[in-house]
Each structure stands twice: as C-alpha cells, then as structure tokens.
Image (cartoon, rainbow, N blue to C red):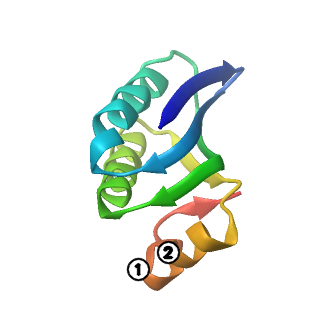
Amino acid sequence: MTIAVEVQGATARIHLSGGIDYASQEEFKRANQQALSVEGVREICVDFAHATFLDSSGIRALLDLQKRADAAGRALVLVNCNSHLREIFEIGGFDKVFRFG
C-alpha cells in the first residue's frame, strides 16, 4: 500500500493505493495523524480511487479516524469508492456510519 497526504486549503486528502489491511494499518494511522495535525483543516477526505481492497483492520482504522475527526471538530468524507468497496461498507452497515462524497 502507498499512502500520501495532500493539503489544499481547509481539506486534507489521504490518497490510498493498494490494499488497506492489517499490514498497512499503522502506515494509515500515521497518515491520519498527519492529516489531523494540520492547522486550519476542517475536512479530511480519504480517497479510495486507487485502493484495491479493504479488510476489517482497515475498517477499524477508518472508525478510529472518524472518532478522532469528530473529537477534533472535523468532517470525514470517503471519496472515489468503487462498487466493490462500497458493497463492503453496505454489507457491514458502515454506509450509515461514514459520509461518502
């Protein structure tokens, strides 16, 4: 997995490439912390355009990011989810937890 954080104005975008799983969760958490630590950021977008899969560890890391973003008064938006990833969120009921853009 490759992760990059890009900040434009009040939005921090976390670009994901590859799978989000147990092996990559620590790298993802570091990117989350980087995005949360930027002054003036009001929205964090997790961009799944190049993500290939997501397992329960990845969902847990997203839930942790949601909790931390809420505590910091920042919005979390998941963007560019393909139909397979969207189905994973829907099957688990997480489509009601996360905001999608």
The nearer-to-camera label among 2 and 1 is: 2
Q: Position of residue 63 (x, y in %)?
A: 35, 56
Image spot of residue 71 (x, y percent): 35, 42
Query: What residue is rendered at 68% in x and 64% in y?
Result: 82
Residue count near mark 2 (Cα–Cα under 10 Å), binned few <14, some 14–19, many ≥20: some
* Image coordinates for residue 38, horizontal then vertical, percent: 50, 17
Seen in the picture, residue 58 relative to 17 is either above or below; the reply is below
Visible in this render: residue 54? yes
Out of 16 and 101, give the one closest to the viewer.
16
* For residue 92, side relative to residue 41 (left or right): left
Checking the image for residue 88, the label placed there is 2
Question: Is 11 drawn above or below residue 61 in the view shown?
Answer: above
Residue 43 visible at all = no
Q: Residue at x 58, y 40 (%)?
A: 17
Mark 1: which secondary structure?
loop
Q: Which mark is residue 49?
A: none
Other residues around mark 1 within 10 Å, as few (<14) / some (14–19) / many (≥20): few
Q: Amino acid at mark 2?
A: Ile
Nearer the observer, 58 or 8? 58
Would residue 53 appear left or right of 13 to someone viewing this image?
A: left
Query: Residue visible at 54% across and 47% down?
Result: 76
- Residue type, label 1: Gly
**Residue 8 percent across, percent down from the top left:** 72, 21
View extreme (bottom): residue: 91
Q: Are marks 2 and 1 in contact (CB under 8 Å)?
A: yes
Q: Secondary structure at mark 2?
A: helix
Which residue matches tag 1? 92
> Based on the displayed image, in which of its 4 quarters is residue 34 positioned?
top left
Instruction: Kindly report the distance in space between the C-alpha atoms of the residues bearing marks 2 and 1.
Output: 6 Å
